[in-house]
Amino acid sequence: MNLDKESYKIDEKLKKAYINSFNKVSDEIYYLIIIATKILRYDFEKRTVEADIDRLYDEFVYFKYYSEMSKDYLLNFFMPLILASRNFEGYESTVKDLSEKLCKFYGFESKKYEYTIDVFCYDIIIRNLLIGNKDMLDILNKIKDEIIDFNPYKESKIDNVKFQMAKIKYIELIHKCIDSYEIEENYGVYESSIEIIDILQYVFNEDSFATYSKKDDSGCKSVYNLLSAFVKDLEIIDNSKENLEEVYYINMKSNIYKDFIKAMANHLLRVRYGKVSIGKYNLKSSPKDFLKRELGEVFSDPILSMVKVQSREVVDENSERKIVLKLSTKTGEYKFEYKIIDNS
């Protein structure tokens, strides 16, 4: 076996899957994936990938000014960490931390247990697809078997009880899903109400994703895009039929975004292999500082890097007055909104 060739295949799969996860998704999901990529760093002592929580805090502060917070499925916030890590054990503790921070930020802290389980299952799915396992039932059975021993909250009694309750429900639903294929010989998708399990089925099933009850959820679409890219890529590489690179860029926002996303995919691999040294974030920044900038001014920012002020206007919206700043960066264009408080 040519190890260099096999490593190249894996790298290409990872890059194309990452890129495809941006296809036809909302600005919110786009920005969250970018944020989740930017906060990753390689710990050379532990030889693992970790998330810089201090940077994440400031990223979330900025996020409130330029993006809406929907109720979409946010699993792909964890996706860059999964792709950059060699195994789940290497980042298990980071998942708990990120899940807690994300769910607290979005105001649904009780979902942190479900997201922790989802990431565990997502990891199993992705690593099986990476090695060429396209047997959906086999993957589902592996999830069913491995999830039993998964217990990341054993050090906290309260968290552990709540996690076990969520896990029991999860296992029951996976059993029903597997039974629908093995016993009932169901040939359609069995919607289990577990998003990652349902999306996996749509990737392998003939039923169109357009029939999924959560087809309009941009987060679900992003996960579907990523898993679909893995499945398609396995066939492309094995058969060497065609280069579908352009498929992964359909409906992207602009060529600038395409180039940036490709650059981020390459950066993710450099983090994965410890080929880039990123120091811990220890800077202070605030979106309110942008209000001091002049129209057309170009400046450096700890979170957005090089920024240019494209426009500034005062708008009245839903009985509220706002200052709206449009900023351009290599990450894309941002629209920061600041409420004007009337103290009169």
Image: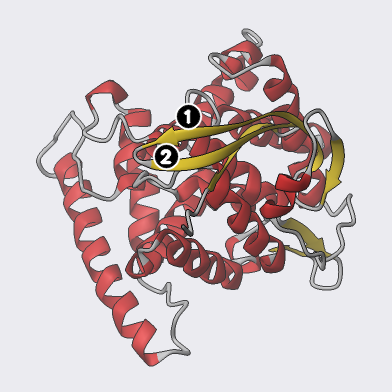
Q: Name the residue under label 2.
A: 219
Q: Which comes sooner in the sequence, label 2 or label 1?
A: 1
For residue 141, above or below residue 244:
below
Q: Quadrant of the N terminus?
A: top right
Rendered image quadrant of residue 209: top left
Direction front: furthest residue: 344
Could you say which is closer to the camera, residue 18 or residue 124? Answer: 18
Which amino acid, mark 2?
Gly
Which amino acid, mark 1?
Val
Could you say which is closer to the camera, residue 253 or residue 135? Answer: 253
Q: Distance between the residues labelled 2 and 1?
A: 7 Å
Disc 2 + disc 1, Cβ < 8 Å: yes
Tell me if I can see residue 229 in this picture. yes
Rendered location of residue 339, percent (x, y): 51, 48
Please give the name of the residue rendered at 35% of the width and 88% of the height, measured from the top-left corner.
158
Mark 1 neighbour density, 10 Å: few (under 14) some (14–19) many (20 or more): many
Please give the name of the residue rendered at 86% of the width and 41% of the height, measured from the top-left corner.
299
Direction left: furthest residue: 184
For residue 242, above or below residue 238:
above
For residue 135, above or below residue 127:
above
Q: How many marks?
A: 2
Please give the name of the residue rendered at 70% of the width and 68% of the height, measured from the top-left corner.
54
Rendered location of residue 122, percent (x, y): 46, 50
Rendered image quadrant of residue 320: top left
Rendered location of residue 288, percent (x, y): 68, 53
Q: Mark 1 points at which residue?
A: 25
Relative horizontal placement of residue 23, taking residue 147 as reference (left or right): right
Tell me if I can see residue 207 in this picture. no
